Amino acid sequence: MKGPFQKIFLQAFALFCTFNASAQVFSLTPGGHFVINGNPTFVANNGGIKNNGTFTRGNGTVLFTGYSDTTVSFITGDSVTAITNLSVNKTNGSVATKSKVWVYNVLTMYNGKLYADSALTLISDVNNTARVAPVPVNTSRIEGKAIVQRYIPARRSWRLLTAPVTSSNTIYNSWQNNGVYQTGKGTLITMPTPIPANSGMDAGINANYSMKSFNPATQGLVSIANSKTANISPGNTGSADNAGYFIFVRGDRDPSTVANPNNGYVPVNTTTLSSSGILQQGDQMFTAAATAGKYTLIGNPYASPIDFDNVTLNNVTKRFYVWDPSLNQVGGYVVLDDAINSGVYIKSVSRSAQTKEIQSGQAFFVQTTSTAPASVLIQESSKSTTNNLLMFRPAAVTETITTNLYLLNSDNTTSFADATVAQFNESFSADVDWLDASKFANVNEGISMLRNGKSLSIERRPLITANDTIFFKLAATTARSYQLEVIGDNMQQPGLTPFLIDTYKGTSTPLDLYASSGSTVNFSITSDAASAVANRFMIVFRTAGVLPVTFTSVKAYQKSTGIQVDWNVESEVNVMQYEVEKSADGKTFTKTNITIPTGNNNSSVNYGWLDSKPFEGVNYYRIKSIDKDGTVRYSQIIRVVSGSDNTTAKTSDITVYPNPVVGNVMNVLFSNEPAGDYMIRLLNTDGQAVFASQVAVSSSNMTQAISLPASLPKGTYELKVNGSNTQSVQKIVIQ
C-alpha cells in the first residue's frame, strides 16, 4: 500500500479483499471483506473509503487526517460502513459521509468539518449507545443532518425522553418510524378513538394518550394529539432546540402491544427510537421558569451523556428529577440532589440505577429557586464519557433515614415501588426550603413525607429530638398487601427510640435504625376506605429507657348479674400493684380490688376483675397503678349501667375525657355503643383531616386511649367518630 494509506497502524489485522489504491481511495469491491481485529487505528490521510463489500469494524478507529476537502476525504459506496470509533482531525478541509455510515461508540472531532448528509447514524443497541465527544467549536463542526438512535429495553413503562437534535423531522417521521411496522423499530403513540384524519396518531385504549409534553406556564403535562404537525425537536436555532417528553413505550409498533396486560398475554419487545436532525453543538442555554418553585422539563441536548455537576445553573437548585422505568409497574420519579453542595448526590430511591450522569436521549426536570430569570447552561465541557461512582462523603456527618415501599406479593416476594430519604444535620432548617425536594406523583403507588402541607421526596431538617415526627403520605394504593422498609445510616441518637405508628391499626412498632438491615412492617389496604387514608403512617422518636405504664384501654360491661372490668396496659415496668376503684357519682371513688402484675413486662398485658355487687343504675370505674417507688397513676374513667330499668341512664354516647386534651393522649369513651370497628378522624378548622385511627370496640362501655402526634398544633378541632350505625361529631381542644 502506498500514498495516502501508508499510515495504517494495526495492532493486529486480517485483510481479505481486493482494493484499488489509486486516486487516493481505499476501494472495497463487491465480494471483498475487510476485517480489523483488535483495537487498531485506520488512518486515511487525504484519502477516502469506497465500500462496496464488507467492512468489519472490530474495536478500532477510523481516523481522517490531512488537508483535503470532501472531493477526496469521504466514505461512500453501496454497503453500510460500520465503524466503532470515527475521528476527524483535519488541519484544513473536511470529510463527508456520502453513504450509510454507522458509528457504534465514539465520534470525535479534533479539527475540521464532518458533513453528515443524512447518512451518518449514531447506533444505540443492547450493548452501547454511541456518543459525540466534546466538540471544539472554534476548530470543528458537524454539518448536515444525522440520525440518532435510542435503544429501549423490553418493558411497558413511561419514560422521560428527548431527541438531541435541531432542525428535526416530525414525531411521526421519527419515533413512529413513518407509521411503518418493522420489528424492533419505532413505537406506537396512541390517543383515544376516533383518531382525527391525518393526525398520525395510533389507536389507543382506555381513553389514554401515550405521549405528553410539559407546559411550564400551567406546570402540567399536555397530551400530544397530532404527531405529523409537531417536530420531535421544535426549534431550529441550534441552541436548546430539543424538547422533553413523557411517553409510554410498550415496545415496537406491533399493534397487539396496546392490549390491556390484565386481559391476557401482551407482547413486549425491545425497540429503537430514531430521530433525524443536526447534532446540537456548542453552548445550549435553556430558559427555566422565572417563578420560585416552578419546574422546567429539559432534554439532554447532546448525543452524549452529560454530568450534572458540570452544568451551569442560574437561579436553579442543584437537583434534578428523572423517571426510572424499572420501578414499580410502569416506572417512578427519582430525585438526585446535592442542594447542600457537599459533592455527593443523594437519591430519593436508593435502589435506582440513575447517577448524576444524564444519558443521551434522556430528559429531566429542574426547579427554579426564586422569582427571577432562571436558566440552565449545558456546554461541551458538560459531556461525560463514563458513569463514574462518587468516591467521597461530606465532611460533616449527616444522619439518614430511607423508607422503601414495596408491593408484597401472595408468595411473599416483593416488588420495589417507591422511596423517601430524610436527612438530619444541625445546618439544616426545620422549614421547607430549597434543600428539600418536592415529590412528583407517580402513575402507580408512591410514598412521600409531609411537612407544612407539602409532599417531599427528600427532606433535610435539624438533628432529631424527642417527639420528632416524620409524617408519611401514601398515594395511588390499591386493595392489596404492601411492605415498608425503614433503614438508617449514620444514626447517632442512642437516647431515642423510633416507632412506626399505624393510625389505622392503632399500633406502634419499634424500629431498629442502627442495624444495616433496618426494619420491615407489612400492611394491607382493604375494602375499608380508612385503611387507604394517605397519612396512615408516621415515625415518632421517643425517649429511650423505662417508660411509665400506659393504659391503652379500659372497658366495663354487664356480665350475668355483675359488671366485668377489663384493662390493657403497655410498658409495665416497676409496677407493684393495680387497684380497681369504684364510684356512684364519678367523683368519690373507693378501692374494691387489688391485682398483682403478672411480672415486669414491656409488652401489652390484659387484666380483668368481676364486680359481683354493682350499684343499681350507673357505676363508674377507674384503675389505679402504684409503682414500687410509690408513684401513682390513674386510668381514664369508664361508665356503665347495671340493671334493666334505668333506660335514661343507658343513653348511647361517645365523648372525650378530659376535654381539653392534655399530654397528647385523647381518651375516647364509648358508652352503651354496639361492638364493632369505629373510625376516628380529627379535622382542623379548614376541614382537613390531620389524624385518623381505627378503634375496635368490644364492649358496650369502653374507653380507648389514642396517642396523638406530638407535632399536632394546639387549638380547636372537630372529632368525627363513625361506626356501622353510629356517627358522632364534637369539638375538642388540644392543649
Image: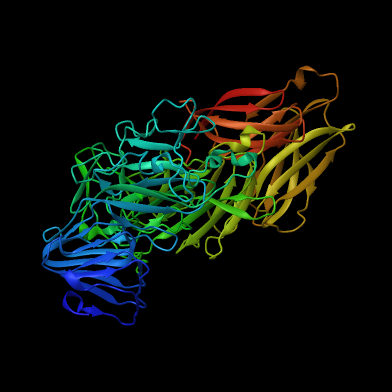
* Quadrant assignment, res 177: top left
- Is residue 260 visible to us here? yes
Q: Residue at x 65, y 42 (%)?
A: 264
**Picture coordinates of residue 26, whole percent (x, y):** 24, 70
* Depth check, front residue: 147 or 340: 147
Comparing 58 with 490, the one in front is 58
Name the residue: 37% across, 38% down. Answer: 172
Q: How is the image coloured?
A: rainbow
Q: How many marks?
A: 0
Q: Please determine whether, in this image, residue 631 is positioned above or below residue 8.
A: above
**Is 71 left, or right, of 481 in this rendering?**
left
Percent coordinates x, y for residue 419 in the rendering: 49, 51
Front residue of 364/305: it is 305
Please provide percent x and percent y for residue 164: 29, 49
Residue at the (70%, 51%) spot, across then down: 604
Q: Is residue 279 left or right of residue 529?
A: left
Which image quarter is the N terminus in? bottom left
Is 646 on the left-hand or right-hand side of 486? right
Q: Is residue 588 visible?
A: no
In the image, residue 485 sits, relative to residue 490, either above or below, namely above
Residue at the right extreme? 560
- Residue 394, image x, y percentages: 33, 64
